[in-house]
Image: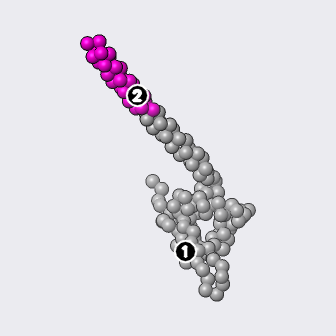
Amino acid sequence: MMRAFIQHKAAIQQTELNQIVQQKHAETLLLLLLLLFLLLLMFQCVHLQSLPTVNGFLEASIAALPGWRKILPNYPVVSWLSFVEYVRATVNSLASDGHIRELVCQLQLVGEVLMLYALSLTQSIRQPFLAFCKKTDRKSV
């Protein structure tokens, strides 16, 4: 009888121990999921901080896009040199090549242009072109 009581007591303790382990396991999984979620949020914040910021150069260029459509030859596809010359003539005459490359990256991010490269048959260099992606001559409301 004492032996049965001890076995019963051991079985109850084992069941309680299993419940505690399962509870700790569930808590550990929840903490890991929370940690994973926080890491994901942190990654998104870091990623958003790495995006280029909007500046006056971008805004002025977007405002000038409707006029460019009427003036630039071969619109919606223009050569890199034509684009650079037109940016310098209409938006900012002091814009360097680096500024214009950054502008093109920003215009691509907002979906205004797409940078394309054409391989010349007579030369072994890639020539950049810009393709305007959407009509920007929207009427203001």
Residue 63: which quarter of the image? bottom right
Look at mark 1 in the image and give the residue it sits on.
77
Q: How far across and down, in percent of the image, does residue 20 sit?
A: 39, 25
* Magenta residue span: 1-28
Would residue 19 be found to the left or right of residue 49 on screen? left
**Mark 1 vs mark 2: in front:** 2
From the viewer's perspective, is residue 84 above or below residue 39?
below
* Residue located 67% across and 71% down the image: 85
Residue 21, numbered label? 2
Nearest the eye: 28 or 75:
28
Nearest the eye: 101 or 36:
36
CA–CA distance in space, label 1 to label 2:
66 Å
Q: How far across and down, in percent of the image, does residue 138 sit?
A: 47, 61
- Closer to the chain start, of discs 1 and 2, is 2
Judge whether residue 25 is colored magenta: yes
Nearest the eye: 111 or 87:
111
Q: How far across and down, in percent of the image, does residue 11 sit?
A: 32, 22
* Residue located 53% across and 58% down the image: 110
Residue 10 visible (yes or no): yes
Q: Amino acid at mark 2?
A: Val
Q: Amino acid at mark 1?
A: Val
Would residue 10 be found to the left or right of residue 96 on screen? left
Residue 66: which quarter of the image? bottom right
From the viewer's perspective, is residue 67 above or below residue 109?
below
What is the magenta segment's predominant secondary structure? helix
Nearest the eye: 104 or 63:
104
* Residue located 48% across and 56% down the image: 140
Identify the secondary structure beneath mark 2.
helix
